């Protein structure tokens, strides 16, 4: 096997590398040395322009072209966190268990940990009167619901029907009022937790 020495290879470093790109502006025959994005939704696609045409293109560039006002506001709101998902401070920390309940343990793997609290459920209250039954129906619960069940369902329904999450819908606002009335009635008549 023969090894070539560095001096035996024919490398010519003095010769400039020829650019094969031409300016993509119609009618321009200069070299396209400067790239410009095609659109914000296509980050890998680029045009190649000469210096004069890339300056003109950049001066007329509108990142939000084709977006309506809602899309622009959503983009700006998400841009604050670099378009990464975020959660409210303190979410998922009420579950008890190790590490303040910052995770879910559906299989009970950490149930033997000393900091894990056993789940306590209240006894079902007896909902006998007509107004109480109608209030339970308003919260989409049956007659065997505990006060904990009522609290959990109330929080779910408030999140679902709040006008801020429904674009100010009057129907959602009316539904939320009925849910609030039902919850306050059940809370007043609920049996105390043991």
Image: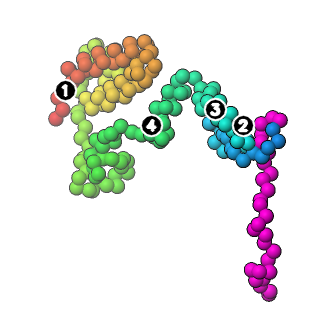
Q: Which residues are magenta?
A: 1-27
**In percent of the image, x 79 and y 64: which residue is there?**
15
Find disc 2 in the rendering and name its residue.
53
Q: Which mark is residue 80?
A: 4
Q: Position of residue 111 (x, y in %)?
A: 29, 53
Q: Position of residue 190 (x, y in %)?
A: 21, 24
Q: Position of residue 81 (x, y in %)?
A: 44, 39
Q: Mark 2 falls on what kind of element? A: helix
Q: Which mark is residue 59?
A: 3
Q: Earlier in the sequence, mark 4 or mark 2?
A: 2
View extreme (bottom): residue: 1
Of circles 4 and 1, the one toward us is 4
Label 1: how many Cα within 10 Å (few below 14, some 14–19, many 20+):
some
Q: Earlier in the sequence, mark 3 or mark 1?
A: 3
Q: Main secondary structure of the magenta part?
A: loop
Whether residue 145 is situated above or below residue 95 in the rendered picture: above
Q: Quadrant of residue 151?
A: top left
Q: Quadrant of residue 8?
A: bottom right
């Amino acid at each position: 096997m023969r090894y070539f020495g560095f001096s035996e290879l024919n490398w010519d470093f003095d010769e400039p590398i020829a650019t094969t790109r031409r300016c993509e502006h119609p009618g321009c025959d200069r070299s396209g040395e400067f790239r410009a994005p095609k659109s914000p939704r296509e980050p890998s696609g680029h045009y190649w322009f000469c210096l004069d045409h890339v300056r003109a293109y950049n001066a007329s560039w509108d990142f939000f072209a084709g977006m309506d006002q809602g899309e622009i506001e959503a983009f700006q709101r998400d841009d604050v966190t670099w378009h990464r998902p975020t959660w409210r401070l303190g979410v998922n920390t009420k579950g008890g268990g190790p590490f303040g309940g910052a995770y879910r343990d559906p299989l009970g793997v950490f149930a033997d940990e000393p900091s894990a609290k056993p789940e306590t459920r209240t006894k079902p209250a007896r909902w006998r009167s007509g107004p109480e039954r109608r209030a339970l129906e308003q919260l989409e619960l049956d007659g065997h619901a505990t006060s904990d069940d009522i609290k959990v369902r109330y929080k779910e329904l408030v999140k679902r029907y709040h006008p801020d999450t429904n674009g100010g819908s009057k129907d959602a606002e009316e539904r939320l009022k009925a849910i609030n009335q039902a919850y306050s009635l059940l809370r007043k008549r609920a049996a105390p937790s043991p």
